[in-house]
Image: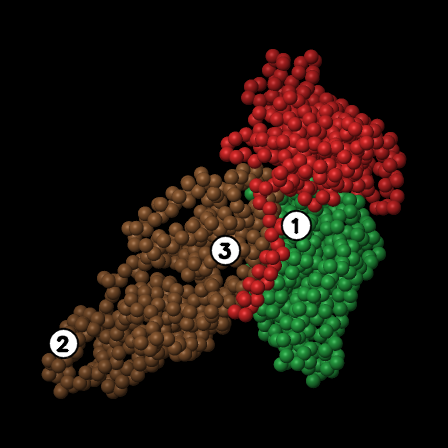
Amino acid sequence: MGINRYLYYLIFLNMIINVVVLVPNILINDRFNGALMAMLVSIPISLTLIYFFGKAIARFPGMGLPEILKDHLPKWGHHSTLFLFGVMWYLIGLIPLLVFVSIIKDYINQDNDRLLIISVLLILLVFCCRLNSKTLLYGMEVLLVINVPLVLFLIAKLLINKEMNWDAILEIGTHFFGIPSLQSIAAATFMFTGYTNMVIFQRIFEGKFKFKHIWMIGVLGLLFLLTSFFIPIGYQGTDGVANYMLPWLVTADSIRIEFFVVERVLYLFIFVYISIGLIGTIIFWHIALDLLKNIFPEKSRDKSSWAILILFSAVAMTLEIFLNEYDRYDFTSAWLIVRLFGELLLVLIMSYAARKKALK
Amino acid sequence: MFAKKVTESKKWLENKLKNSSDVKNDSISTTNFKVSVMYISSICKSDTIYQYIINPAFKTDTLSDYETYLRSFPGCTEPKDNQEALDKMLTGSVVIFLKSKLFVFEAKNVQSGYVSDANVEISILGPQDALVEKLSTNINLIRHRYHSERLSIENKIIGKLSQTNVAIAYDQSIADDSVITDVKKKLSEIDVDILQSAGQLHQLLTNKKWSLFPTLLITERPDRIVKNISEGKVVIIFETSPFALIIPSVFFDFFSSMDDIYQLPGVGRFLSFLRYMGVFIATLLPGFYVAVASYNPEIFRVQLALSIAGSRATVPYPSYLEILFMLFMMEFLIEASIRLPKTVGSAATTVGGLILGQAATEAGLVSNIMIIIVAAVAIANFVIPINAMGFAIRVVKYPILLISTLFGLTGLAISFIGLVLYLANQRSFGTSYFRFFEIDKPPNKKNKESTTS
Amino acid sequence: MKTIRLTLILILMLTVFTGCGLKDIDKRFFVIGIGLDQPEDEDNKIKVSLKLAIPPKESGKSAEFQVLTAETETITEAVRTIKSKVDKELDFGHTKIIVLGQKLVQNDVRFVFDWLQRRRDIQKIAFITVGKPSGLEVLNVKPPSETLPADSLILPFGQGGVESPSVVQQKLYQFYQKTTERGLDPILPIVEAKKEYFDIKQAGVFNKKKLKVELSKEETKMFNMINTGLEHTDVKIKRDNKTAMVAVEKASADYDIVQGKKPSIQMNIDIEGIVEEQTSRDPVTEKALQKYEKAGSKEVKATALSLLKKLQKENVDPIGFGLRYRSRSWNNDTEWEEWQSIYPTIDFKVKVDFKLLTPGIIK
């Protein structure tokens, strides 16, 4: 458990929050059309990307993406890449945020206004994503240590319950041979993308971390994919599962803890996912902020970071007002596809920069 | 030839102990001969030195007479080598350099007579001594638990009017240099008239207007000080305060009691687990109660929900006022029993406990369940072993209660995340507050100088 | 400092907008049970009864409740009507039991589930039953032993209460799942309201829309044995005019669908038990034990076959043979149609392994 553990935390974080990035929804919609194949295909794709990324970034110990790009790309290319990735990281945090607002509105604060809920969350986000990178990692560690046992407890509880219908799962298993859609491949690869957060966090590791045990990431990712895909099917049935806006929430509400103060697992689930998901959003926006503010000249960075954060909040609120739940789904699945190509681009740029550095 | 060896030994010893301000190096010149003595003043009895070493020197005529005189003491021996001399010195012996010989003369000063028992940080199985309000005694207590030449003690005077004597103690070979220089720099920058307590110095060192959580550990236990020194930390000891500051300290240090080490490991783990449970209850329970009772009663089991609803039926105001009322009453009670003289204190708690426990529920002002919750919060708070942290936790439940009252469970979740990140953002002399594992420590310069002559 | 001031201002600003969400626990009326019935008036479509719990003022007092009823066209309107009759906010967060009237389930009940499933505040783990003679009457029963409203209606379903072998436990989400799943049909327990107690021993099988067939007590037990396995049940064995009761400690079943020219369902039932009572005065020797085993397995086989045939005749499938068939077949496009043509004529082959471990304390 060296300093490397923070890398695995970041990867693990993405695997857990897949539920609130609507990954299971997209896969479940494709359950009869090659969702399983998409999951299988996503593993080699992701692991190859991780391998090349790890190789490239090892050449820049202690450097973040802005510094790397500054040295190896022309100014226009450097700025436009930063902008592109900044927006991407902003959106990766925005989607869970929007999902949280509707979960909170539906299950916790039924009488509060959506805008009020999102502004409360935004206050937390805006203050927290300006914090130091190291602080965020330490905070994330504590939150994960508290919450991951609960996540594992929930999954175990769901898996050993007699009401889970294994025939339904096997039936989906017989739909294994199908041509996967791009959408489901993009959704499945999201599981593995925690490593890209290294573009900023690499700075505080000072080159002391290594990408080791890549196969383990693959195994872990596959396990999480299978659980987050199959458990709702086992509970809600092969046909019924698609009738829910958020199948995982109904599934969490399908079991109860008989011998505990809190009977409904649903609230435990919501609490756990809000704390893990919000720290995820904070980390993603922290990266987005860092990438975007590096476009501006050194002197005006403090001011511009506030401006960026206000813009972040304004966009989040606007989307919250104008998107209904179906729009949000479409938006997410489109974004996941864009993200897959973005990831590809990131790895290409990194490898290009690494190559250039090696030649120098 | 021997004379040369003696001078060499003296130089070697001086070099070894150069960072300690309590090392005395005196020479005694009588009309007939010259003798020099070297000892650590904080652990030697000056009476003994004066009476049996210095005074006789003036009464004997020749050096050989003096040597014979010294040899007649059972506690006076000739060390085999320099290392033995050093070890003896560290346990309270005086090294006497004659012309061609050197002796060690035991003049140990064990201070236990007027050292009081610890009464703020109580340990069941550990040593019972506590620091006192005298610097030399405190240094003595530490030296007696840390017999190593690597322990260096440096003196400083702080406070324009109070001129408080302050000592910085650390282990030269494992303490972090950057922390030492940082502490020294900060101490010399302090501009204050009167310095009287460790807590005050804590504020002057951290220099934050609104800080809530202690980032330096204040302790009265010499055994804790010694343990921390052996882990490479820097300790500041005072002339006028029975408390010491440990620098740097992380969040988890505030939840460790010395008993964790003295108890068997299984018991120790359980005890520290209890404390973290206590923190969760003390900080989150009031907020959780309000959020659940006023926003999401469906979280409880139906049986519990109905009995809470039943017991609240006569309460005329919302749950957050009810809990605030009771919490403040509890705080008054605690404050009263701390500040009042001991004889009156117990009377205050009896009266208060009686009124709060019985009458308030019977009058229908608060529900029965609320009494249980407030009592649980208060007791859970007392589990925290370090006082400063206990006070911080006492305060921090109020903001969480406020946010939970406004936004229900969402507020609770948000304030919890906020609290965790706030704590993660604290730094104690460059060390992150949430440092979990040993591995994150700054690289030690272990065993920097272990070579002997 | 600056950030702290800013946070305080923001929180104060938000305080102005909140406050409407705060509603104390004692200002809410918890709806413990919902009863849904066929209305008496022709114009209306549904009769909704809500069982409201009145929290005990003093600890130790027994449960009080109130049942309010309204008839309207939709459930939402009925709830609105009831809301105007009470002084507190209705809270569905603790709805533990939903009772469908016997008459209501004779027709298509899917519209009811639309409301139940769409409402986010109704627990998806609420138990759902059919009520005889009506949902309202089931809700109105007040057993004297009850400490909390509707406790005696909830506990038989949940773990922690009596575990009766003839109670089929179904949660709201399960019913909804089975109304959509191809090859798995919904089944509900039937609760009969008596004067001061409930009788839960039957079950009703639905064909996705309405109640199709009612199972007797023995059939319900058999269904439970096949579906989930049972741990505490008993079997009555009749042999040469003598009757013996066997306490079953473990009963489980598994089945396979054998495809081919003449497809069949091969079912193995394993039962382990001990003799609990017999009318014969002869000692239960080893030989007698074996005879009982033989008679017992015959008995169980007969019940199982009659249950399976009954279900087949009505073309309902609460055990999930269809889903099993689908899950084992790789021709995903045609499997469902295939099954629909196979099921009405499929053969059942039941093998019972009945094991008596001991005659009890005496021989």
In the rendered image, residues at marks 2 and 1 fall on the same chain? no
Label 2 belongs to which residue?
Answer: B69
- Inspect the image, locate mark 1, and give the three-letter code of the amino acid beneath it: Asp
Q: Which of marks 1 and 3 is in front?
A: 1
In the rendered image, residues at marks 2 and 3 fall on the same chain? yes
**Chain bearing mark 1:** A
Q: Which of marks 2 and 3 is nearer the N terminus?
A: 2
Q: Which residue is drawn at 44% across and 38% down?
A: B362
* Residue A134 in the image, given as x and y percentages of width and height: 57, 69
Dividing the picture into quarters, in which one does residue A143 lie?
Answer: bottom right
- Inspect the image, locate mark 2, and give the three-letter code of the amino acid beneath it: Tyr
In the image: residue C176, left or right of residue B14:
right
Is residue A271 among what the camera can see? yes
Q: Which of marks 2 and 1 is in front?
A: 1
Label 3 belongs to which residue?
Answer: B397
Question: Residue A111: which disc?
Answer: 1
Classify mark 1: helix, strand or loop: loop
Which chain did the renderer colour green?
A
How far is mark 1 from mark 3, CA to CA?
A: 25 Å
Q: Residue at x 13, y 87 (%)?
A: B31
Q: Residue at x 66, y 72 (%)?
A: A307
Dividing the picture into quarters, in which one does residue B356 lie?
Answer: top left
Which chain did the renderer colour red?
C
Front one among B376 and A343:
B376
Q: Residues within 10 Å of mark 1 (few under 14, many from 20)?
A: some
* Residue C299 in the image, given as x and y percentages of width and height: 72, 22
Classify mark 2: helix, strand or loop: helix
